[in-house]
Image: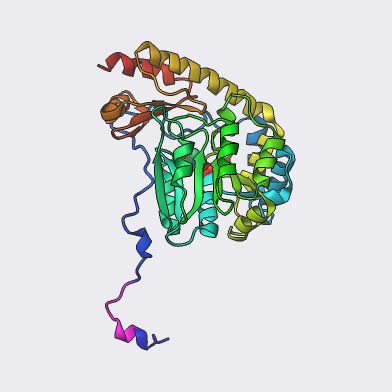
Amino acid sequence: MSAGPAAEARPEARPEARPELAGLAAYSSVAPGPVPVRVRASSNEAPGGLVGPVLEAALAAVAGGSRYPLIGGAELASALATSLGVAEASVAVADGALPLLDRVLMAYVRPGDEVVMAWRSYEAYPLSVQIAGGRSVQVPLTESGVHDLAAMAAAVGPSTRMVIVCNPNNPTGTVVAWPDLVDFVDALPRDVLVVLDEAYTEYDDRARPDAASLAALVARGNVIVLRTFSKAHGLAGLRAGYLVAAPAVAATVRSVLPPFPVSSVAVAAARASLEHPSVLGDRVAATCEERSRVVALLAARGLAGPTSYANFVWLPLGERSLEFAELCREHGLLVRPFAGEGVRITVGEPDLRAVLAEVLAAWG
Ligand SMILES: Cc1ncc(COP(=O)(O)O)c(C=O)c1O
């Protein structure tokens, strides 16, 4: 086989990535230090491994792993539709909430389009927007770490294609009230897509909107509710997430997903988790109780952040954030620092408080 004439004209040429990718930051993870890790509290995972019927379903699915799952993760989409009280056509599933967000961006964001988001929020958002060729518009959180919905609405301009609301917000754990959210959505132009990232919603122990309110919100046609099995369902390593949207929006996202977007093992485990809500309920209740105890432990040492409605707490330590995280690491505790801003500590691991107490005793 011989190359065409273009090859001869450009002997030194190399494949070039899209220019939008220049300077793309890496999705960071917290590396263990020289001290063996005793408690991992840096990634907002659920404690422990798979249990009971969820473990059994996953193991049984492994044996059948030589077969493709149904196209589009159909068994999981249909189980979700039943459990959420929405039409199956309103659901799209994939191997996590983040891969779904990437496909939403792929489907809706054109080069140079703006995506408005609160900041600080989930660190993957600006990376995903950049990969999609869009531009992030970051609107500072209020002093108390809450989305400033008025400022976000004011930041929406002619080039805005999408707004992301992270509720509860990672890393501050704060929430916006449902009526405020509905007013916010109503005030936006109908051609602006609102992605409501509810990755931690199960830990939000306020009165939650019912299925009808969720259905009414997405029926507006410009709202996508994004959720995951990685957090409260405890399936981060298996990879499964979903979105709920108006049927036309969900169909658009499904059209840009790979044909088999979730593994058969993840489908089986996620379905089992939906079918056995007490497994999820017990885990969430235990985590919320533990969250109160961790908050009390920190408060006794004079450390406090905003009220958290997620499986982590936020300590706005400002310039001392890296110092605190390093002290944690020296005690075998992995937490997630954001330089100059604060430290996020995942709650749920039974040994967390014991190690944290050691850290706090050494914290000057
Ligand atoms: C707010 C938020 N959204 C989405 C994700 C990603 O979830 P998944 O594991 O389903 O891709 C995370 C993970 O940390 C998150 O914090």
Boundaries of the magenta span: 7-14
Camera-side residue: 81 or 259? 81
How many marks overall? 0
Residue drawn at (51%, 30%), measured in percent from left and top?
175
Residue drawn at (69%, 49%), measured in percent from left and top?
90
Q: Is residue 96 visible?
A: no
Camera-side residue: 345 or 130? 130
Quadrant into which the C terminus falls: top left
Q: Is residue 302 above or below residue 251?
A: above
Q: How is the image coloured?
A: rainbow
Q: Is residue 283 above or below residue 123?
A: above
Q: Residue 29: horizontal and vertical position, in percent?
A: 38, 40
Q: Is residue 19 visible?
A: yes
Q: Residue 299: horizontal and vertical position, in percent?
A: 39, 14
Farthest residue, direction top: 300
Q: Is residue 286 above or below residue 7?
A: above
Q: Name the chief secondary structure element in magenta.
A: loop
Camera-side residue: 263 or 201? 201
Residue drawn at (72%, 48%), measured in percent from left and top?
88
Q: Is residue 314 left or right of residue 196?
A: left
Q: Residue 287: horizontal and vertical position, in percent?
A: 54, 23
Q: Is residue 290 left or right of residue 331?
A: right
Quadrant into which the N terminus falls: bottom left
Q: Residue 79: horizontal and vertical position, in percent?
A: 72, 42
Residue drawn at (40%, 44%), measured in percent from left and top?
138
Residue 24 shown in magenta: no
